[in-house]
Each structure stands twice: as structure tokens, then as C-alpha cells.
Amino acid sequence: MPGYEIIGEEEKNEILDVLSRKMLFRYEFDEQREGIYKVEEFEKEFAKYCGVNHALAVSSGAAALRVALSALGVGPGDEVITQGFTFVATWEAILDTGAIPVFAEIDDSLCLDPDDLAGKISSRTRAIIPVHMCGAQARIKEIVSVADSHGIPVLEDTAQSCGGRFNGKALGSFGKVGTFSFDSVKTLTTGEGGMVITNDKELYIRASEYHDHGHDHDPDVGRGLEKRNFIGLNFRMMELQGALGLAQLRKLDNTILKRQRENKSRIKYALSKIGRITFRNIPDPDGDSASFVIFFLPTSEKAKEFNRVMTEEDVGAVYWYENDWHYFERWEHLLEGKSLLPSGYPFKNEAGETRCSYQKSSLPKTAELLSRALTIQININMDEQLPKILDAIEKAGKEVI
Ligand SMILES: Cc1ncc(COP(=O)(O)O)c(C=O)c1O
């Protein structure tokens, strides 16, 4: 899964290209940079790869969400629906705009359940964020259809599924806007970094200005003379990250995804030989980026037992049900409304009244699914790990099932 596994000469050469001109910055210095605009080039290549008109590189996946939400006009008084199985960044970004996250269930795709989504929409819903979790698709067509029927924009959090597709179309390109992360554990990494993609030119311009202190990016005047249409902040990507992104993107399909798919199919085959194991529903297996294999045991006890054997063999699986960063019931800081601010904002308003609060047991379907699910992370290079994993699966199958 992590693109850092295959960092090599291509990345080094791209970085040297930047350093040799001393141009670490994406804007300005047109003469010194001798035509080298790595972030801009990365944006163009990434947009082409995703089949969209616009891509805006930013400083992280969380920044991508934050910028996209602002470009959608989300703010105080609004609600944004997302799922109770995601990384905390998804709802942190919502709270950071002043809006309130509303959590919906996942289904057996382990992504947003379109049926539950429909019941969570209110007159305040301003955006819907399905998260393409763990390398594969949400039921994105159905989600977009529910959202469209209410005229609500969809923001696809594609942080974990770069390179994933549904019926050949890039994940992140189905809704109004899509976001990506290129952090340390992502399929394509730039160290830290992210991307916002869209076909909506106006939204792209708002995002581009917002992510750069409001600069209106007028090509006819110097940067210091540019005007501002509204306030913004700094979420810029730097040239070194753009350089890394270019090198990694060139390897995405033919090295990263290809090897992940080979490794995943071997693990999945071993698991499929064990009775009573079922797999996560992947709406389009051909478009799976194959960075994880997720399977269900009949009960949570069996899942824990299976993982105990795997762990004894030194290849323990991820048990999201007990993971503090990805699962609603484990987000105690959200459930207890812990804020850095004495006022308690964003959980309380200025008068000390509750703005939003969350109950631990409010997503029973998500709990039931995750309590039976085990996840094996797929790496690009698994030659040493693979035999151990396959042996452990066989052993756990015999002992537990
Ligand atoms: C679903 C999801 N959204 C957003 C992010 C945030 O990305 P970053 O770490 O680049 O801020 C992550 C990171 O793991 C993620 O998994």
C-alpha cells in the first residue's frame, strides 16, 4: 500500500530537478525556475489520470477536505453527512468549517450505506461525504443518486483509494468534488500532501483562491499585486511534493496497483478456501486499488480468535472495531465533546448550549459489521511477508473455523 516502498531513482531525479534551481515554491520566481512548475504539472497529470478538468494540489488530505468544503460554501448552521467508519480527518474538517457532522451507517461495502443516508438528510444538509474506505468503492452511483434527488453536492473522500475506479471511472470523479491524501501510508505518497479534483470550474477557482490566502491568481499581474475576492488561508503544496507526486503517479497503475492486485489475489485465494469466511462487498472488483483485503467471520468472537492466531504468527490483522482512529465508537474525544477551547466550541455555542453531541451506540449496523471484520494490509513488496501470511491463514482456519 504505501508508495514509499518503491521510492527510487525517478523520485530522486525529480527532487534534484527542483533543488538544482532552488525553487521550492509553487508560485512566483518565473525566471529562476526555468519553466519548471512541478506542482502545476502534477495537478495536470493527476487531473488527466482521473479524467477530470481540474485538480488542485494541497498540503494534506485533511486540507483537501477543508478546502473543498469551503469551496462548496459549507459553514455554520449547516450539516454534513458522513460515515461512522473513516479516519477522524473527515469529520474534523467538517467541524473546522463550523458545520455539524451527522453520522450514517456503513453497509457491507464498509462505506456509506445509501439507504441509511436517505434517512439522515435534513433541511440543513449542505454536503454528503462518502468515504471510499480501504482501497475500494462506496456504492457511489446510488449515493450520488440519493444526493441528487435532494440537490445536495457529494464530496468523495478518496484519501484511501487513489487509483481506484468504478466501471472504469476514477473514484473521486462521481460527485461534485473529490479529495485525496498522499500522506505516509497512502498508495501514492508525497510525504504529506493532498488533491482536490472537480469538473466544476467555479468551484475549482474558489478552492484555488481559498487555499492560497485568497490570491485571485491573475496571470497578468505580479503576485504582490493580485487582488482578493474573499479571505482564505495557506494550504499550498510545495514543489518537492509536486516532484514526488509526478514520479509516483507514473508508477501508480503499472507497478503499485499491479503488484498490490497480485498480492491481494493470493491472500484472498487462501482465505476463500476456508469455509464460513465472507468478503467485503466490492461493487466493482476490477476497480479495486487492492490496498486491503477485508473479510468477515461469522461472529466477533471468531474474528478475535482468528486474529489471535494470526498475531501469534506475527502477522496480525487490523481489527477496525478496536481501532481508535477510524471507528465512531472509539472516538472518545468526539463522543465526550473534548475541545481545546474553554468555551467548548464546536460542541457548545457561546451561550454554553450544546451545538452537537453524539451517542456511542447510535450506529448498530456499523458496529455489527466491524466487530466481525478483519483486514490485511496489502503492500507493494510482500515477498517475505506473503508466505507467513498464507501459513497463518491456513493455521487460523484450521484452529478457529
Ligand atoms: C479517509 C481519510 N480522509 C482523510 C485523511 C487525511 O489525510 P492526511 O493525513 O493527508 O491529512 C485520511 C488519512 O489517513 C483518511 O484516511
Image: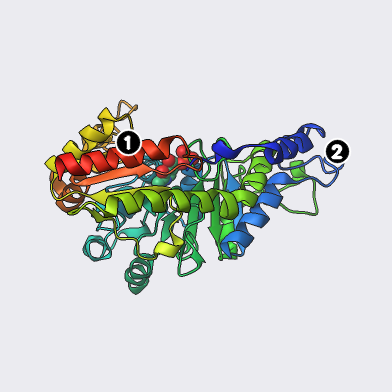
> In what quadrant does ligand 1 lie?
top left
Report how far apart the C-alphas of labels 1 and 2 lie in the structure.
Answer: 43 Å
Q: Which mark, by number, is residue 244?
A: none
33 to the left or right of 363: right
Q: Nearer the viewer, residue 128 or 79?
A: 128
**Amino acid, disc 1:** Trp
295 or 188, which lies in front? 295
Residue 239 appearing in the image: yes
Image coords of residue 179 (percent x, y): 49, 52
Vertical placement of residue 159 versus 399, above or below: below
Kindly state the secondary structure of the residue where label 2 is placed: loop
Q: Quadrant of residue 223?
A: top right
Residue 357 in sight = no
* CB of mark 2 near ligand 1 (< 8 Å): no
> What residue is shown with label 1?
325
Return the x and y of residue 70 as percentages of the image width and height: 48, 51
Q: Amino acid at mark 2?
A: Gln
Q: Which mark is residue 32?
A: 2
